[in-house]
Image: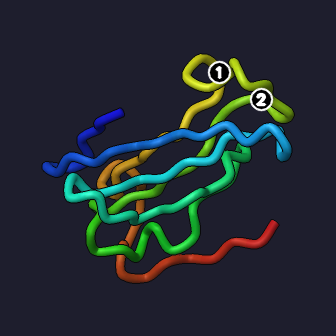
Amino acid sequence: YTCTLGERQYESEFTWRPRLNSWHWTLRTRDGLAIIRGFRLSPGASPPRSRLDGRLPAGVFFVVGPDPYVRYDLGDTLAVVFVPAETIPDTDPDTPEIVLG
């Protein structure tokens, strides 16, 4: 699956792992270099360090959907969402904020 973030194109690959009963996501540059590799899709989660990777536009990835989910939820009720930094109030992409809850 090809997606455009900012002005760059990326390749997304989703793999179902039956033993773990979960989807895993890999995001690659158009040249095939993995930026995010094998991230388990857990609703509410965000890939670590993705905000700090200069190969990605400023913003935040997170997973939305039901918890637990089933294999057929991907693309229907389970998704990876990217929110550009400019749409998040008071965001400084160079100063990540850690929130523990």
The residue at which mark 2 appears reads as 66
Label 1 residue SS: loop
Which numbered disc, 2 or 1, marks the residue that appears first in the sequence?
A: 2
Position of 91 compared to 32: left or right? right
Q: Report the quarter where the N terminus lies.
A: top left
User: Looking at the picture, how far across and down is residue 95, in whole percent?
Assistant: 43, 82
- Against 35, residue 8 (above or below) is above
Q: Residue at x 86, y 33 (%)?
A: 68
Say which mark, if any, is on residue 20. none
- Against 73, residue 64 (above or below) is below
User: Looking at the picture, how far across and down is residue 21, in whole percent?
Assistant: 82, 38
Label 2 residue SS: loop
Q: Residue at x 81, y 66 (%)?
A: 101
Q: Residue at x 57, y 62 (%)?
A: 47
Instruction: Judge by depth and name the residue closer to the eye, 51 or 24.
Output: 24
Position of 97 compared to 31: left or right? right
The residue at which mark 1 appears reads as 77
Which image quarter: residue 89? bottom left
Q: Is there a contact, CB below 8 Å, between mark 2 and mark 1?
A: yes
Q: Amino acid at mark 1?
A: Thr
Position of 51 compared to 74: left or right? left
User: Looking at the picture, how far across and down is residue 81, in whole percent?
Assistant: 49, 40
- The chosen color scheme is rainbow
